[in-house]
Image (cartoon, rainbow, N blue to C red):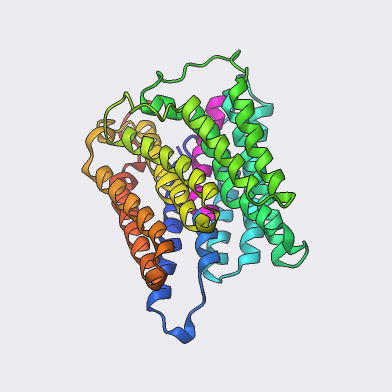
Amino acid sequence: MLTQNPFRLFFPLGLGFAIWSAAVWIAFGVAPESARAYPGQLHADGMVGGFLFLFSTGFLMTAVPKFTRSFSAQRWELGVGVGIAAALGVCTASESTTAFHWVSFSGIACLIGFAGRRLLARTQNPPPFFVFVGVGLLSGLLGALGLALTDSAGLDAAWIPTARALYFTGMMLGLVIGVGGRLLPMLLGHSAAPVSDPAAGRIPLALWMALAFLLGSYLALALGLANTGPALRAASALLVGFRFWRLHQLPPRKGVQPFLIWLSAWSIVLGLLTAALFPRYALHLMHLVYVSGMGLMTLMVATRVTLAHGGHDMALEAGSRALILTGVLVVLAALTRVSAGWLPSGYLTHLAYAAVCWILGVVVWSTLLVPRLRPAGKSTC
């Protein structure tokens, strides 16, 4: 069961990081001043390298064998994945940033190896959008390596902005576009469920343009063009959002989950755009991308994966009060975190408030979906 549906293993592990990585702000607020150590790096690492990466691992280890019509995950691969997750947990508990980045590098390399073995054994080509999955994983790999080397002074500190952009934004943005390019139109109701077509390998011109913008954004950062990089990244998201996700239209598929996915996609696009337009507040505005964007989208896509693969009642997507409350709390967390940038006197308090909202949202989602990680009937996916 786990080898065919690894998400059952990795989603709960990711939830642990989702809660812990926000809780550090609450702990920081109540700790004695003499014992305080600013947890900004721990928070960012745990959210992206823990929560988002482990959910992505669970999804890709489930989906890639199906997209390529190859073989399912092997037990040893699951064991390696759990070992990586445990090592990341030890690194966060010991607050070892350098070790975390090296372990994260290893985890991304293992996931690339997993996908590569299925691509070599494929009997069907993956969707054209999957080129972004490869770009995302390679971005994360290079970013983690760059951060690990700069942590240990093995690489000049001038590379830090590029490494951070690759790891904290490039990895997940590539995965969101790569997986979402095929999945989001279906979940929003713009297209029917994907039909297997081994010959469908042509990459649309607009997708090549979006890819060029994304890659160009990191080249610009490496060349020291600090404002050009974010602008190109925003252009890539805008092109994908309006050309392929049709964000200018309300979701034809009615219900809570499609609306929240639509809202999360808008958060990614608007967050990248406003961060490029107002670089002074980019750190704060990017939390639209991370919290109500990638975070909320991850939870909503995981909802579909959990319900469909477990043969559960799909009507929960349409009108579940738990999903409504999850969406409200996560969006409130994002807005509270963004507003902190304009409230310097209450900055740390707002970080704690945002953390509380996020944790409550994750807990509410968990009470609905974690019990359903066990199959109830025939898979509909």
Q: Is residue 238 visible?
A: yes
Across and down, in percent, residue 315 comes to 25, 31
Give the left or right position of residue 68, taking residue 30 as reference.
right
Quadrant that contains the C terminus: top left
Residue at the image point whose x is 48% and y is 32% from the top: 241
Q: Is residue 305 above or below residue 337?
A: above
**Which of the pair 45/125 is nearer the observer?**
45
Please indicate, yes or no, whether residue 381 appears anywhere in the rendered image: no
Residue beneath the point at 52% across and 66% down: 40
Q: Quadrant of residue 151?
A: bottom right
Determine if the magenta segment contains residue 101: no
Q: Magenta part mainly helix, strand or loop?
A: helix
Residue 1 in the image: above or below residue 200: below
Figure quadrant of residue 340:
bottom left
Look at the image and give the residue range highlighted in magenta.
48-67
Q: Nearer the viewer, residue 226 or 324?
A: 226
Does residue 198 appear to the left or right of 267 in the view shown? right
> Looking at the picture, how far across and down is residue 12, in whole percent?
42, 51
Vertical comparison of 177 with 128: above or below: below
Q: How far from the left and from the top, in percent, is residue 3?
A: 51, 38
Q: Looking at the picture, how far across and down is residue 98, in whole percent?
A: 65, 65
